[in-house]
Image (cartoon, grey):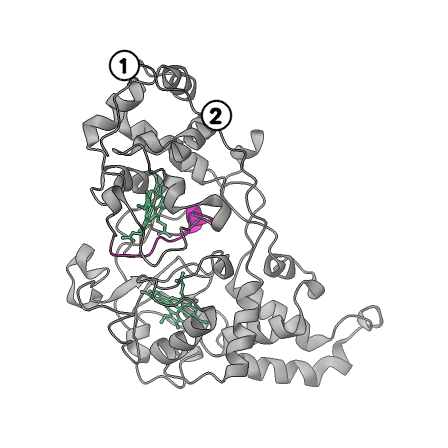
Amino acid sequence: MARFAAAVPTEPPSRKRPKAGTSASVSISFQNCAHGPEIAAAPLRPRGRLGAVTVLALGALVIPALTSPGQAQTPGKSQDTLMEQARQQFQPIPENPPALPGNTATPAKVALGKMLYFDPRLSASHAISCNSCHNIGLGGVDAEPTSLGHRWQHGGRNAPTVLNAVFDKSQFWDGRAKDLEAQAGGPIVNPVEMGSPEPHVAEQLRGIPGYHEAFAKAFPDETDPITLANVQKAIAVFEATLITPNAPFDRYLKGDPNALSATEKAGLALFMNKGCAACHNGINVGGATYAPFGVVTKPGASLLPPDDKGRFMVTKTPGDEYVFKVPSLRNIALTAPYFHTGAAWDLRVAVSVMGASQLGIHLTPEEVDKIAAFLGSLTGEQPQVTYPMLPPSVASTPQPQP
Ligand code: HEC
Ligand code: HEC
């Protein structure tokens, strides 16, 4: 279990978007887009300025000159160039969970967090756990457009996956929680999710004798460790273990040119050259910045209902209307339906909507197929989680309020 020590520096989430025009790279991918400066509002990576088409063409020209005898059997310069271009914009998911600042992972804390993640008694009805809406066997989602919560109420947004969420710079579609620890308190007390009033959470857990020992082991320095704050810490360290390394795309980034098929490579090239990667980049192929949904063309009300103004609800800044966190595309093939509304069930439709709404381009069916094939290569090794045994309720345990 020493592997939890692996430290990955996490930058503090950027709460404010830099002012329009501050980022260097906008020119790269938005030749077709009349709204470049609006896109510039998201901090884009200043690398990869050369259009990749140009790079590929140059690569093809220099092969004869640069290929050494030893490389003669390898796939060719243009492929290496594609890999190089990809490495500048994406990083592989690491094999080990990252360390969380101020929240050291110990085996006892991770084990407690796992129990809490699966324990429906954190909800008022004792029927809903984190896993109900973020099912680890379903790619970390619930496969519903919007989740069913307490008393069959529907929330307003689609449940994003918990897999690799630790690598996102902020949590929720609007980024209103700065990290997993802050996030984990939200759904437990949310009346349309788990519906447990805050004081009830600790009371409920104190009423389950087996949790006394589990919390004492996880928080050995504290005299009264059963608190909502510690529930959040324990769940966060468990969630940090829910990472999916070694996707074909990760193996490609690590240098295996055969990890992607020709179609997936063509999709990767389109993904970078058409401009998708200007927003969806980094370790999570997203998750690092915010952008308006509808940079060029505003989607219809089914995809972008007027009442959900996204990040505006957090910042109250007019420029943040209909701005959302650029979602991670890791494991995207597993997490339909798509968008914050969950209104698109077909990944190909989501890709095509993105072309029109974010880039102002019409992607041909063949291009959409290739991009969707590339997105399929983002499915990594799913976490193998053994279902935890939960401490039993006793006669004095607070009873469900369905
Ligand atoms: C009733 C369904 C439901 C339950 C139960 C639930 N969630 Fe969620 N979760 C959601 C929805 C919906 C969102 C998105 C809400 C938003 O963005 O406003 C979300 C967002 C998240 C996110 C943010 C992911 C991202 O990419 O931004 C994390 C992490 C998360 N939930 C973890 C948990 C944990 C841990 C629990 C248990 C304590 C839990 N959830 C319980 C539905 C649920
Ligand atoms: C200007 C930034 C930007 C660009 C460029 C962009 N996206 Fe997105 N993408 C977003 C945002 C923001 C969302 C969230 C939309 C919402 O509110 O549901 C999103 C959502 C998605 C989703 C749905 C994810 C989910 O979990 O539901 C997919 C798939 C996707 N984008 C793929 C692409 C592809 C493919 C391209 C290129 C054709 C692209 N994006 C270009 C910002 C961008």
Q: Is residue 346 left or right of residue 262?
A: left
Seen in the picture, residue 8 relative to 294 is either above or below; the reply is above
**Magenta stretch, main secondary structure class:** loop
Q: Is residue 62 above or below residue 289?
A: below
Mark 1–mark 2 Cα distance, whole angstroms, equals 20 Å
Tell whether circle 1 marks a residue whose Cβ is less than 8 angstroms from ligand 1: no
How many circles with numbers are drawn on the protein?
A: 2
Residue 51 can be seen in this image: no
Q: Residue at x 58, y 62 (%)?
A: 377
What element does badge 2 sit on? loop
> Within the magenta stretch, is there residue 80?
no
Q: Disc 1 designates what residue?
A: 396
Residue at horizontal 31%, vertical 80%? Answer: 296
For ligand 2, the image quadrant comes to: bottom left
In percent of width and height, residue 272 lies at 51, 73
Task: Tell me if label 1 and label 2 are in contact, CB under 8 Å.
Answer: no
- Residue located at (34% from left, 77% from top): 357
Badge nearest the viewer, 1 or 2: 1
Point out residue 56 in the picture as x, y percentages from the top left corner.
62, 81
The residue stretch that appears in magenta: 156-169
Q: Residues within 10 Å of mark 1 (few under 14, many from 20)?
A: few
Among the two numbered marks 1 and 2 on one chain, the one whose residue lies closer to the N terminus: 2
The reply to whether the magenta stretch includes residue 164 is yes
Q: Quadrant of the C terminus?
A: top left
* Mark 2, residue position: 389
Mark 1: which amino acid?
Ser
Quarter of the image holding residue 395? top left
269 or 341: nearer the viewer: 341
The one nearer the camera, 382 or 295, is 382
Residue shown at 54% from the left, 76% from the top: 369
On residue 121, the disc is none
